[in-house]
Amino acid sequence: MNPYSERLKSIRDDLDETQRSMSRRFNLGENTWQSYELHGKLPKGETLVELARLGYDINWLLTGRGAMKVTPTEEATASPLNDALIADAIDFVERWLSENGCHLAPRLKGRIVSALYTLGIDEAGGDRPRLNTAAARQLIWFALQTERQEKPS
C-alpha cells in the first residue's frame, strides 16, 4: 500500500465510512474512493477542498508530515486554503500529463501541486493567487527528467 492509500484509508476510518459511502459522500463514481485507496491516486481538487473543510490537513495527506487533522488553534491561525488555486494546480498537472501521454508517481505529482500552490500564494502578495502555468510546465518537465534518471535501466 502506498502512502496516499494509507492516509486516505485513515481518513475514511476516522469518518467511520465504507469505500462506497465515501464515494457517495464526495459525489464520486461508485467505486472511485476504492480506486484511490487501491492505486494511491490523489483525489481531484474538489474532493481535497471538501476534506480540508472537514478538518483534514491536506499537507498531511500530500506529505505525511504533521497531524491528520488540523487542530482548532491551527485552523484559526493558518491561512485558509485557496480552493481555486489548489484545484487549478491539480487540474493543470493532470491535464498536461494526459495530453502529453506522460505519467508521474503520485508522490511526485503531489510535490508539484504543493510547489505550484506555494508559488501561487507567494507571487500573489495581497492579490488573488493564480497558477503560474510557465512554472507548472517547467516543474513537470523537470520531474519527468528526474523520474527517468531515478528508474533503474
Image: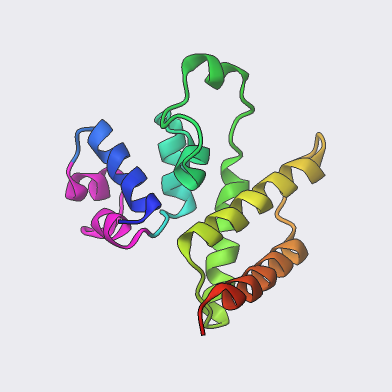
Magenta-drawn segment: 18-40
From the top left corner, tell me how far across and down residue 2 is, in percent: 36, 56
Split into 4 quadrants, where in the image is the N terminus?
bottom left
Residue 68 vs residue 72, the one in the foreground: 68
Q: How is the image coloured?
A: rainbow
Q: Pick out the residue farthest to the front.
A: 152
Residue 16 appears in the figure: yes
Q: Is residue 12 left or right of residue 3?
A: left
- Taking the spot 62% from the left edge, 18% from the top edge, the residue there is 77
From the top left corner, tell me how far across and down residue 118 is, in percent: 69, 45
- Taking the spot 24% from the left edge, 47% from the top edge, the residue there is 24
Vertical relation: 50 (above or below) 151? above
From the top left corner, tell me how far across and down residue 109 is, in percent: 54, 61
Residue 10 vs residue 26, the one in the foreground: 10
Q: Quadrant of residue 91?
A: bottom right
Residue 78 vs residue 91, the one in the foreground: 78
Q: Is residue 9 left or right of residue 99?
A: left
Q: Pick out the residue farthest to the top.
A: 73
The answer to if 28 sits in the magenta stretch is yes
Q: Is residue 75 left or right of residue 118?
A: left
Vertical relation: 73 (above or below) 53? above
- Taking the spot 73% from the left edge, 48% from the top edge, the residue there is 120
Number of numbered discs: 0
The answer to if 55 sits in the magenta stretch is no
Vertical relation: 56 (above or below) 83? above
Residue 88 appears in the figure: no
Please tell me whether the stretch drawn in magenta is mainly helix, strand or loop: helix
Q: Quadrant of residue 34?
A: bottom left
- Taking the spot 58% from the left edge, 36% from the top edge, the residue there is 81
From the top left corner, tell me how far across and down residue 140 is, in percent: 65, 68
